[in-house]
Amino acid sequence: MSVPPLFALLLSVSFAACAPPAAELETSIRFATINVEDLRTDDLLNPDHPRLRLIARQLQMMRPDVVLVNEIAYDQPGVPGFREGDESGLNGARLASILAISQDNGFEPLRYRAFMAPSNTGQASGYDLDHDGRAVMSYPQPLSAGPDGSPAAQTPDGRAYGNDNWGFGTFPGQYAMALLVREDLEIVENEVRTFQHFRWSQLPGALRPTDAESGEPWYPDEVWEQFPLSSKSHWDIPVRLPDGRVVHVLASHPTPPAFDGPERRNKNRNHDEIRFWSAYLDGSDAIIDDGGSRGGLAAGEQFVIMGDLNADPDEGDGVDNPIGTWLLSHPRVNGDFVPQADSAGVAAFPQLDADDTARWFLRVDYVLPSTGLEVLAGGIERPSSANAPETSDHFPVWIDIALQ
């Protein structure tokens, strides 16, 4: 398969922060999160997709044992690229199959099992959530990715549809998540919990948006009583490590605290999507999963909070610093270790702080371990050259956890 010249450049540019592969470190296991910026079914069905090949190569260089993939579409009937007769939620497995093929000489394949579950993104609410005078319930055919694999641009009609959805998306399942776990590790399937349908109003102290002019709730009672907290979903995926311990992957991708107005509907939701994990770690009885089970994570259980949380503890537009207030300072969370780009990655992007995980100058992607886990190393994967083509507007983040 040929590679366009611009993308061939990345094949000669190493990622600055990459430590020795976790698979070669018998005493550790690597957890990572990566935002692949709107990877869709059509992309995953195209083995020659340039950006997809580079993402796969990037992961083969990093060699995470457990990786959360953000912004990969949840494939389902009726959406772009879905093939009649297929099951829903195969895109995680499709990405895993690509990673099982070496993308360059010297890069060993990665073999994963995949977990996917439905997302609230692109799910029409039937209500005028953005108060533009219409409730948009159908979506136009989305544009395709560019010839170089760059993400498709949004259209005004697509955004109008997305703004009235339970979670923003220009078609159902866009911007969803997948968890890839090394094939010899066990996902404890009978203990998996998802919280796609947990209602925002069920979270104690929920920050209900208010119309700045009238002082009335932005979402009427009929809407507020149905509104899910998760813009995508929240997952608790227990993974059994080689040493026998179970570590819970707590995965989510909150909405950005932006693209709203004085009512702060997105800012408040971002705050509460992050605060959900604090309530979960506190064992709140208010938390109810999609199977009807109540309560949070039991005391003593170990975990890693992962995902694009769309909030920086020092900068940005978040409400009341939800990362610092609810996660980094939580007694069950080890917030002291901060992954950073190494000197080459810092030099290549001098406009960014060493801990910024997005090209737009913020730390928004996290791999936060529980206090019972020993962190051996960690980093942010930036190219060592600013001229390398972009695989995403985010950089992957990883940490290595010591095995017993």
Image: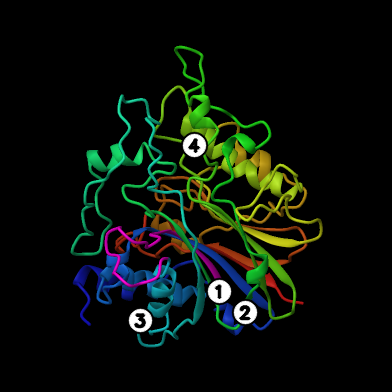
**Colour scheme shown:** rainbow
Three-letter amino acid code of the residue under disc 1: Val
Q: CA distance from mark 1 to mark 2?
A: 7 Å
Residue depth check, mark 4 versus mark 2: number of the one nearer the observer: 2
Is 271 drawn above or below residue 377 in the view shown?
above
Q: Which residues are magenta?
A: 66-88
Secondary-structure class at tag 2: loop
> In the rendered image, which residue does mark 3 sit on?
103
Crowding near the residue tagged with mark 1, few <14, some 14–19, many ≥20 C-alpha atoms within 10 Å: many
Q: CA distance from mark 4 to mark 2?
A: 37 Å
> In the rendered image, which residue does mark 1 sit on?
181
Residue 185 disc label: 2
> In the rendered image, which residue does mark 4 sit on?
316
Residue depth check, mark 3 versus mark 2: number of the one nearer the observer: 2
Crowding near the residue tagged with mark 2, few <14, some 14–19, many ≥20 C-alpha atoms within 10 Å: some
Residue 5 position, x and y percent, is 20, 72
Q: CA distance from mark 3 to mark 4?
A: 36 Å
Three-letter amino acid code of the residue under disc 4: Gly
Q: CA distance from mark 3 to mark 1?
A: 19 Å
